Amino acid sequence: VAPRTRVLCSWGRPALPRPPREIVSRVTLVFAQRPQRHFRRGPPKLQMRAPESDAKDRGQDAAAPGAGAGGAGWEGAAQRTSWRGAATEPEQGTRDPLRKAEGTPKPSPQAARIPQDPAQQNERQQAVVEAFRHAWAGYHKFAWGHDELKPVSRSFAEWFGLGLTLIDSLDTMWILGLKKEFAEAREWVSEKLWFQKNVDVNLFESTIRILGGLLSAFHLSGDDLFLEKAEDFGNRLMPAFQTPSKIPYSDVNIGTGVAHPPRWTSDSTVAEVTSIQLEFRELSRLTGNKKFQEAVEQVARHVHSLSGKKDGLVPMFINTNSGLFTHLGVFTLGARADSYYEYLLKQWIQGGKTETQLRDDYLEAVEGIRRHLLGRSEPRKLTFVGELAHGHFSAKMDHLVCFLPGTLALGAHHGLPADHMELARALMDTCYQMNRQMETGLSPEIAHFNLYSQKAAKDVQVKPADRHNLLRPETVESLFYLYRFTGERKYQDWGWEILQSFNAYTRVPSGGYSSIGNVQDARNPQPRDKMESFFLGETLKYLYLLFSDDPDLLSLDAYVFNTEAHPLPIWAPA
């Protein structure tokens, strides 16, 4: 085996080591042998009524000339505007040619025992597989090749026009052992996924879903096609970093190479610019092209050096011209800031725990959370994470914040203070109660916590505008981590309850699952006719892993999950 090269990045520390470039033979699947466990089945499915007439097959984009092809990982291969208002249009612009690699990078060696043998799946895992098949059937029939399924109207919606749900689901299908579905999706990627389009994409969302999804699919399957597509896409995202401050713009046109901030501001959100590092670093390591890693680490260095923090907590916005934080004095672990904290820890783990500045920033932030953002509710005295605005504490907690118990547990597992696990357990209880105290058993998008002792009061209170549920993964994500590290069955049971609630209140008979508008109305949860790609890419994946009793199935000593649940390998220091 050729020695790994040792490269010093611009931060003055070893960059992620580059793996040996060898021709990779087909991944040998080794299946674990474990006895089945039997569990009771879930509740009857919700009978949502969709239109009687089937939607017409909307077809697929024509195959682009020169689309990549490669060997499948398994044998037997079988218009909405973007959030900024940019529509998908015919091909325009020029293409940044791919760098020609010498041989093929090596995928993750731990992938050899994935997927699990379907014959060894326990009953709860089988229920997740059935839920995925049902969701996938709706996507395949009514939205194939499009970004999102609209399950109630039996149609589709576009965001980027890049088959978002399909790419987000690739590694989930591989992990669940869905060979036929994976092979068909792989064929679409080979023949239909073409990035030469005059379309704006959001840098953050496209990085975590598309780039992360392709990199993970490469590592699990060993199929070069996914790495080739990932490198092409990564090249097309690079113009976003061409700003006066090197803080990237929020949007980039992958066909023309023109990047820009939102029309209404020159700010980017802190979470968006600091939650793309895992993916770009891994792309550099695989391709040997340092530009991807250098771009995102320049951002990380800059954010590290900024003033305006409060004991490690960061504001929500950063200006792409000045490079300074804006909207100072407002601190949250919810939207616009959440994954900044997650990626501090996960980059440290990804790089072999050598980048101590990342660890130190994370530890400081955890202490800032303890000091400024923790609260206790009444009457159950639940520990929650609130928000701070100019010195005023608000007992508001986004469901997004439920990523934190899992992140804290992951850090404790990797040698950080043991009291992080204690806080993780307390917050996990709170996130479970955010689901359990709702009539549907599903969490609202935003909760407010009661701080005053009064009879018959619930800890979790919900405002009418916040009662929706988007099929988000954060609670089951943290349940997975807590069960993996503690072995306590209650975490599996809580996840089973949530899966039952998804089946009872969000499942559409014709195929798919729908976000709902009111988690407090079990009679009419108000389906919103949208299945987010992360339901397949994250929520069902984490549920499947939660129900596994095999700690080596995507071992957390071998993989780190990006914020879209795409597993990437942990590499030893150079």
Image: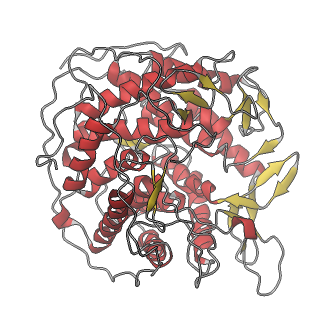
Task: Decide if residue 203 is on the left or right side of residue 281.
Answer: right
Q: Is residue 190 above or below residue 56?
A: above
Residue at position x 73%, y 20% in the image:
321
Q: Is residue 172 above or below residue 123?
A: above
x and y percentages locating residue 3 in the rendered image: 25, 16
Quadrant of the image occupied by residue 285: top left
Residue 247 in sight = yes
- Indicate how the structure is coloured in the image: secondary structure
Question: Which quadrant is the C terminus positioned in?
Answer: top left
Quadrant of the image occupied by residue 86: top right
Q: Toward the viewer: 306 or 130? A: 130
Task: Decide if residue 74 is on the left or right side of residue 435.
Answer: left
x and y percentages locating residue 139 in the rendered image: 37, 58
Q: Is residue 68 above or below residue 374?
A: above
Task: Decide if residue 261 is on the left or right side of residue 117.
Answer: right
Q: Toward the viewer: 133 or 422? A: 133
Question: Which quadrant is the N terminus positioned in?
Answer: top left
Residue at position x 47%, y 33% in the image:
278
Task: Decide if residue 451 is on the left or right side of residue 557.
Answer: right
Residue at the right extreme of this rendering? 391
x and y percentages locating residue 89 in the rendered image: 49, 34
x and y percentages locating residue 223 in the rendered image: 22, 35
